[in-house]
Image: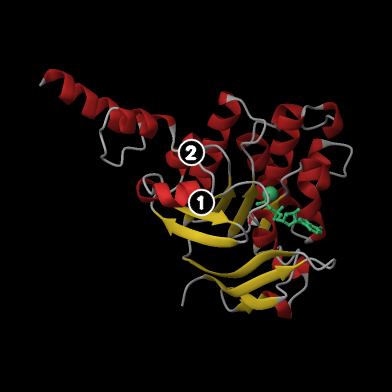
């Protein structure tokens, strides 16, 4: 059985709005997965059901042998850490360090372990130099890294990042890539929602496309970003290099700059 199973899951908000409709998804341990799709597709609602911030109104979610319905949000969020789309929904401490160590203190971990995990999380997110600052004196892009640090510090086996690339510049995206790489090395299962297709093709080995409350496709990035029907349905664009290759009639499922350079060099030499 898969490590994470979303079985025929729907979610209807209390007002009666159906945001996720009969979704099925299986993820293996250690997979790194990007979720893409237009605003309102149901991405955030779906991932909130992974850590029991929301419970399915139909179907169920299994994390290992744990059915989220049988557990509290606090219990599930020790296994699945969720970084909010908007950092201000998550931050409530008056110092960066206080924010990052809060979860660990609540878990009553030994002081030495807390120190080590907080130091790692602050360093890898670049927040170590702002550790004593008030988060609200820092810009949104940095507040996002504070919330990432808080989840990385908890060291849960599954981590969900909701639009970490929103509002980041190139340096921020590079930092995110380094964080993801380290989490992959540590065997974490990482699920990331992003609207940045260049970031997606460069950092994930599987892409899940959501459109209109449903998962419409799941596969390797080179498969997803050359499936024009799926892209159109989800109102997504190919990454720039894929668009360039397509316009040059190189229909070879190119998604990365290096691949395009290789193929163009060969073409020019001919
Ligand atoms: N608390 C809520 N109550 C009612 N509808 C909501 C609520 N939160 C989100 N929605 C609606 O559910 C749909 C899916 O939202 P969301 O999961 O945030 O999509 P995405 O993350 O893909 O942009 C949207 O139409 C949104 O307006
Ligand atoms: Mg969202």
Q: Is residue 134 visible?
A: no
* CA separation in Å, label 1 and label 2: 11 Å
Q: Are marks 1 and 2 in contact (CB under 8 Å)?
A: no
Neighbour tally class for label 2: few under 14, some 14-19, many 20 plus, Cα within 10 Å: some
Residue marked by disc 2: 237
SS class, disc 1: helix
Q: Is residue 182 left or right of residue 51?
A: left
Neighbour tally class for label 1: few under 14, some 14-19, many 20 plus, Cα within 10 Å: some
Q: Position of residue 183 (x, y in %)?
A: 53, 48
Q: Residue at x 78, y 54 (%)?
A: 103
Q: Residue at x 51, y 70 (%)?
A: 3
Pick out the residue farthest to the left.
270
**Residue 248: numbered disc:** none
Instruction: Name the residue nearer the viewer: 8 or 95.
Output: 8
Q: Position of residue 209 (x, y in %)?
A: 51, 54
Answer above or below: position of 180 versus 78: above
Q: Residue at x 28, y 27 (%)?
A: 248
Name the quarter showing ligand 1. bottom right
Residue marked by disc 1: 233
């Amino acid at each position: 059985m898969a490590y994470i199973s979303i079985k025929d899951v729907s979610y209807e908000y209390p007002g009666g709005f159906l945001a996720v409709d009969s979704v099925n998804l299986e993820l293996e341990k250690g997979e790194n997965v990007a979720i893409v799709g237009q605003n309102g597709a149901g991405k955030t609602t779906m991932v909130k059901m992974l850590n029991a911030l929301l419970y399915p109104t139909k179907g169920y979610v299994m994390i290992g042998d744990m059915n989220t319905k049988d557990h509290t949000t606090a219990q599930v969020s020790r296994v699945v850490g969720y970084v909010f789309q908007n950092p201000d929904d998550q931050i409530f401490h008056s110092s960066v360090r206080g924010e990052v160590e809060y979860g660990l203190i609540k878990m009553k971990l030994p002081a030495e372990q807390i120190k080590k995990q907080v130091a790692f999380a602050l360093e890898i997110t670049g927040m170590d130099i702002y550790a004593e600052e008030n988060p609200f004196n820092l810009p949104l892009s940095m507040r996002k890294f504070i919330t990432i640090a808080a989840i990385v510090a908890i060291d849960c086996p599954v981590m969900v990042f909701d639009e970490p690339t929103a509002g980041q510049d190139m340096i921020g995206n590079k930092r995110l890539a380094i964080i993801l790489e380290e989490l992959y090395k540590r065997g974490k299962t990482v699920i990331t929602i992003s609207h940045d297709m260049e970031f997606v093709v460069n950092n994930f080995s599987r892409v899940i496309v959501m459109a209109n409350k449903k998962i419409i496709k799941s596969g390797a990035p080179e498969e997803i970003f050359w499936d024009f029907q799926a892209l159109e349905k989800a109102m997504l664009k190919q990454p720039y290099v894929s668009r360039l290759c397509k316009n040059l009639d190189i229909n070879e499922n190119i998604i990365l700059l290096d691949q395009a350079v290789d193929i163009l060099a060969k073409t020019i030499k001919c």
